[in-house]
Amino acid sequence: MNPIQTYLKENEEQFMDELFSLIRIPSVSSNPEHKDDMLACAQQWKDLLLKAGADEAMVMPSAGNPIVFAQKTVNPDAKTVLVYAHYDVMPAEPLELWKSEPFEPEIRDGKIWARGADDDKGQSFIQVKAFEYLVKHNLLTHNVKFIFEGEEEIGSPSLEEFCINHKELLKADIILVSDTSMLGAELPSLTTGLRGLAYWEIEVTGPNRDLHSGHFGGAVANPINTLCGMLAKVIDENGKITIPHFYDDVEEVPQAEREMIAQIPFNEEKYKEAIGVEELSGEAGYSTLERNSCRPSFDICGIWGGYTGEGSKTVLPSKAYAKVSCRLVPHQEHHKISQLFKEYIEKSAPKSVKVKVTPMHGGQGYVCPITLPAYQAAEKGFEIAFGKKPLAVRRGGSIPIISTFEQVLGIKTILMGFGLESNAIHSPNENLPLDIFRKGVEAVIEFHKAYK
Ligand SMILES: [Zn+2]
């Protein structure tokens, strides 16, 4: 065991106590009922950062949930690493599918089970414990700042303004984020690209009230039927999105990169088995890994209306609703896509209904060059902790703020995430293997040691 591993083993009980008390605060940003929990969670992070060795830490107001900021200056002339994380979590529902309480963490089978165990309380905790080790052992040669926000899971609506207002405070040479996943526990990887996002809510209105489907059915347009019909046309039989001009700015994946993607070990059978589907589907001409990382996608996230209670009710509803989203790739501008979709759906609606499309949150995609010194330091960190050089991969998810950091602060981000597909983030039974926690801390410590 090396000194870092020994240190982690000796302090594990205390570290778990600290992490568990963070997890016990249900900081669900999408539900206003949790307003007080957001502040409580921010304050707890502030205390932990001070305890870890920050010179100063504070809970700062923003237009929305408070933001935690902390810093340690070891040498004003040295470089500065800014660690970004989020303390808010996704709702835990559906609760009945959890094997243990989502906000009462439990260790089973060598894993921590709870909402936020990985995303992002567990992963942020990795960053803070690595920092603590470096401070304690006098190994920090550059400055470190932390910014933890409480609105990542709802699209970070207040962070851009906060960045604009605090450019000097957030000044740094590189941003470090642990909020992404690796290809596997035995297959470490660094994320070099992220997809963007556009999100809408659609409201379709038919008759001025719910009607008797026997008296009116067949003669009056049913808003749910109409909505389903319109949405079904957004993707054609080849898996292409039919919104006019949607692909205009999409950069075709260079052949060299496609070859690299093809080298990523990927077992399609296991992938299907893990999610319980017989067959995969998507855009013709692209592999599964290309489809979910370098190509845009469209999904209906929720659809509702009419009668959904017990038994049956013969009704022709007045309203139908859907929430839909597109994952975008670098160079697609989310405001532009948002507008294109709105126009397309509103124009394609038949006169028999009224359609309103409301754009919700969105964000740009991101690419990190693998030639950056900080990227190479992260690569080294992984290599030491996991015993393998990590693969550079693009991921299908979105962290809209990463591109905002680039646009507002002019700083590139290193996505040094330690999640696993099986950690089930955003789903019931979210978890984080303890082994990954330990290796993660070691990798981040080695990153700081290697970053010059
Ligand atoms: Zn996250």
Image (cartoon, grey):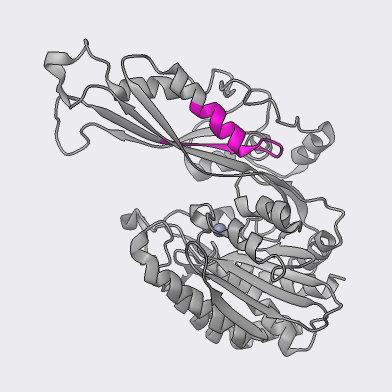
Q: Which residues are magenta?
A: 323-342
Judge by depth and name the residue closer to the eye, 12 or 205.
205
* Quarter the N terminus occupies: bottom right
Left or right: residue 2 versus residue 334 is: right
Say if the magenta span includes residue 333: yes
Q: Relative to 304, does residue 370 appear above or below in the rendering? A: below
Any part of residue 1 in sight: no
* Quarter the C terminus occupies: bottom right
x and y, in percent, of residue 354 in the image:
34, 23
x and y, in percent, of residue 317 in the image:
22, 26
Q: At 56% across and 27% down in the image, what residue appears?
A: 340
Judge by depth and name the residue closer to the eye, 345 or 370.
345
Any part of residue 4 in sight: yes
Say if the magenta span includes residue 241: no
Q: Relative to 313, does residue 238 appear above or below in the rendering? A: above
Q: At 40% across and 57% down in the image, what residue appears?
A: 91
x and y, in percent, of residue 173 in the image:
80, 65
Image-quarter location of ligand 1: bottom right
